[in-house]
Structures are given as structure tokens and as C-alpha cells.
Amino acid sequence: MLVVTADMMREMDRRAMAEGGMPGIALMENAGAAAATAAVRMLGPKARASIHVVCGPGNNGGDGFCAARRLAVAGHNVTVELTAEPERLRGDALIQYRSLAASSARIARPPRTPDLVLDCVLGTGAAGAPRGAAAEAIEAMAAWGAPILAVDLPSGLDATSGFAPGPVVRASRTITFGAIKLGMLLGCGPDLCGDVAVDPIGCDWTAYGAGSPYSLVGSEVAAACWRPRRRTAHKGSYGHVLVLGGSARMLGAPILAGHAALRSGAGLVTVGTPAAGAASVIGACPALMAAPLPDADGSLDERAAEAIDGRHTVVALGPGLGRSEAALRLVRAVSGVAGAPLVLDADGLYALSRMPQAKPARPCVMTPHHGEAARLLGSTAEAVAADPLTAVRAVAERFGVVALLKGSPTLVCDGRVSVGDAPVAIVNTGTPALATAGTGDVLTGIVASLLARGCDPWDAARAAAWAHGMAGRRAAKRLGSEAVTAVDVIDQLAGTLARLERMEA
């Protein structure tokens, strides 16, 4: 799904009118109609509701005037509030304001707390902290305590960055037009927007937004990777994953990665660990194969790289590996040689951060969290959290890989494509239930399973992040967010993938 910045949306609006022959007043009328429809859906069966529409002087206010008129004609008790003098209205917004006279909508404050508030104060193009009457209106909306429908986006939210530098509306639901705005997915955007719906308002916006490097990952991306199995398929058809990791204190991590790879469709999975841990692998999951490999003081060393052969279609390196010098030498030995695709996570990323100028020689997906990304970039976790888009691009382009920056949302960037404007996919299926030990190892296993069956790293990373988040949601729905463990997420992969199969049937 298309995602755009404020500047991109402004240019798309211009092109829709100049090239698509869509008059501005028609776009505004369609937006107002979509907002009125969304309001009716929020109200449910209530036949005559009290609705208050708060409008600014710009085009967002014009959308609100149109919605107010339509809601009043439908029989609702509608009041309209302006945050500027009517004399400041211009163009299409003024036309819509004048049309209110043909309806029963009144320019007034609500006599009591309304059943629903429509926020039409500041639109996508607004920048900086709201001031004056706009700020007062935003604070008043919060004080009423009524459900709020944000029209295009919550007033006070930056449409590009996702930050709110001043007073901001916290909406129950947002109806946005043309495309999702980047700021609705980043920073505090998800918390402020509530449930989001996109309405095309009569245009095919994909033609005007084709240059956007941003996209929102949906189920169709995952379904393209997990296609129904052929009747003649066998285990060799779906690849052989080799997980290299584990140490004396962290044997669970590679087992979780291996189990997740199996559960997400890999044909064969071998877990290579220090010799003392091999029996535990089989005990934890008999479907896994165990490879006891050379180690130094309980951590795999570079001799373990010799276990990689032509049978393995992908290598997952890092879960539970440890941070010894032996582990660092193993990461150098594996990542520095061309061969089967590589998933690099956890201690594998730590080792790479210790190698100045190193770049994986294999096709690679790296899956850092904010702290690991900061270490790779010589930055801080706080800086990564403040600007995750820049961080994921920097990791992807610095190492020439597909980078998957875990978080809310998860961001995936393809650094193999270009420098400076590499595509970024946004995955918002995650849940706070995933904030528990081992879920990152599960994600590593899912990515590895998709690479093993021949998916491109860009597709594998996006699809895996989507499925990982959906499995986490399913686990949280069943157990509650606080009780979910990494094993529960693995268990819920089955239902997640079954849903994709039904889509493809």
C-alpha cells in the first residue's frame, strides 16, 4: 500500500487536478462525503446523533464543512465551529462554507458533550506546533471526552515525521485521503490516529504517487511468498536452513530460530551448536537436526564454518552465539565468503560491528533492534528511535544488505538498490506482546525459511515481519499480551499461514 510524505501528497493533489482533470471542489466534495460516511459508521445504529465539526480555515476545514452539511441532511444534530474568522476562508473551502446555509447545521459551540467530534482543523500540509485558536480547539476536543474522528490526520500530528511538537488530537479513528501519510505510521502517529481507513476520493492515486519509496506491507506480500505447495513437492523443495549459534548459557536462541524456520515452512533445518548442546536441540524439537560443531570455551569458532556445504540453502548466524573472540572469528569466516544467503542477527550483528569496513559477501538480511542498529552505526539507541527511517537506510546502505529494523513499526530497507533513496517498507502488524525474550530469534527463523525456499531477501524480510507480527497478535488474543512467550508466537504461525492459504485457495 502506498505511503507518502506531506510534500508527496501535495504534489499528488496538484497532479490529480492538473493531469487527471479532477477539480479541487470535486476532491473536497468526495472527501467530505467519505468523512460523513465514516462518521455514520462510528455512530452505529444511533439515528439522530449530536455531532460537532471543528474546522480550520484551509482545505481540511472545507472537507469538514462538506461533511457537516451531509450529516445534517441525514438528520443528525450538527454544530460547526471555526478556528478562524469566516473572512479568512478562500477558494473551495469558502464555497463549502457557504453551502452550509442549505442545511440545518449551525455555526455554534455544542450545547453539551457531543456524541461524536470531527477534527478538521489542520490537514496534511500543516507544519509546526498549533497556535492560537487552533491549539485551543484541540485542547477543547480532548476536554469533551467524546469519540473523535480525525479527517485526513489528527490535527497537530506532523504528516511526515510522526511527531507532535505541540497540542495534538488523539483520535478514535482517522479517515485519510489518497494514501496513508508516513507520519501516521511513525513516532506517536499510531497512538494518535486510532483505527485508520484510506479513501481514494475518486482518484487512482497510484499513478501520481509512483515515485514514493515508502510502502505499507499487507497480507498480499506474505501470500506471494507462501504460495500453496505443489502436489509433487517434497522436503527438498523448501530448502535446508542451517542455524549457527548457541553457547553454554544461550542454547535456547538457536533452537527457537530453528523451530520457527520449520513451523514457517522450511523443508529441513539443522541447528549447529557447540557439541555439548546438540542433545538439547533434539530434546527440544525432534524435527530439528543437530550438528555438534567445534567450539572454544563453549562458543562456536571459525572451524564451525566448515559445516556449511552445498546442501544448505541459507545460513542463520547469531542467535545465542556469544561475544567471544572465537564467535567473532566465525562471523568473519561465514560472512566474508560468497555463498548461500545469510540471516545475521543478535551476536552476529555485534561481531559485525567489531569489524571496521566489513560487508557481508553473501546475499544478506540483517535484523537489528534499535540498540544493535546504533552499535552498527556508532550511534545511540535514542538517536535510532528518534529517526528510525534514517537509521534503517544507513544500515542497509552501509552494508549493502536488506536491513530489518525491529520496532513499532518494523522498517525494512533494501540497501542493494541505491544510495540515498533506497525503498523502505513499513510493517505495522506488531504488538507489545512481542516485547519478550526470544521473539527476535523466531523472526530470524521465519526470514531464513523464506530465503531457503528461494524468496528474494527483500520479499523474505517483508513477509517474515508481517507474519511474525500477526502470529504475535494471535498469541496475544489467546493469552493476553503479558503472558505471551516466543514459543507461543511459533505456535501461532500455523494459524497465520493457514489464513494465507485460504486467501490463495
Image (tube, rainbow, N blue to C red):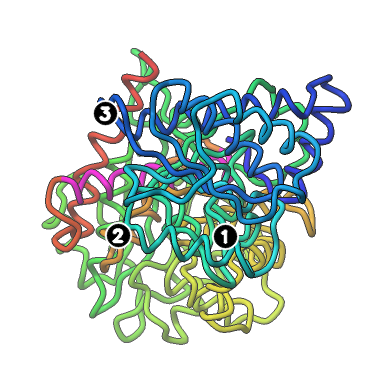
Q: Secondary structure at mark 1?
A: loop
The residue under label 1 is 157
The residue under label 2 is 434
Nearer-N-terminus badge (1/2): 1
The amino acid sitting under disc 3 is: Lys
Q: Nearer the viewer, residue 177 or 254?
A: 177
User: Residue 91, percent across and down?
Assistant: 80, 37
- Cα separation, mark 3 vs mark 1, equals 30 Å
Nearer-N-terminus badge (2/3): 3
- Cα separation, mark 1 vs mark 2, equals 27 Å
- Give the residue displayed 42% in from the left and 46% down from the top: 117
Which mark is on residue 46?
A: 3
The amino acid sitting under disc 2 is: Leu
Relative height, residue 383 to residue 208 (above, below): below
Magenta region's main secondary structure? helix
- Give the residue displayed 46% in from the left and 27% down from the top: 72
Residue 448 shows in the view: no
Could you tell me how many numbered marks the image carries? 3
The amino acid sitting under disc 1 is: Leu
Q: Is residue 80 left or right of residue 25?
A: left
Of tags 2 and 3, the one toward the viewer is 3
Nearer-N-terminus badge (3/1): 3
Question: Would you say residue 471 sits in the magenta stretch?
Answer: yes
Residue 98 image-quadrant placement: top right
User: Residue 105, percent across and down?
Assistant: 50, 33
Question: Would you say residue 459 sits in the magenta stretch?
Answer: yes
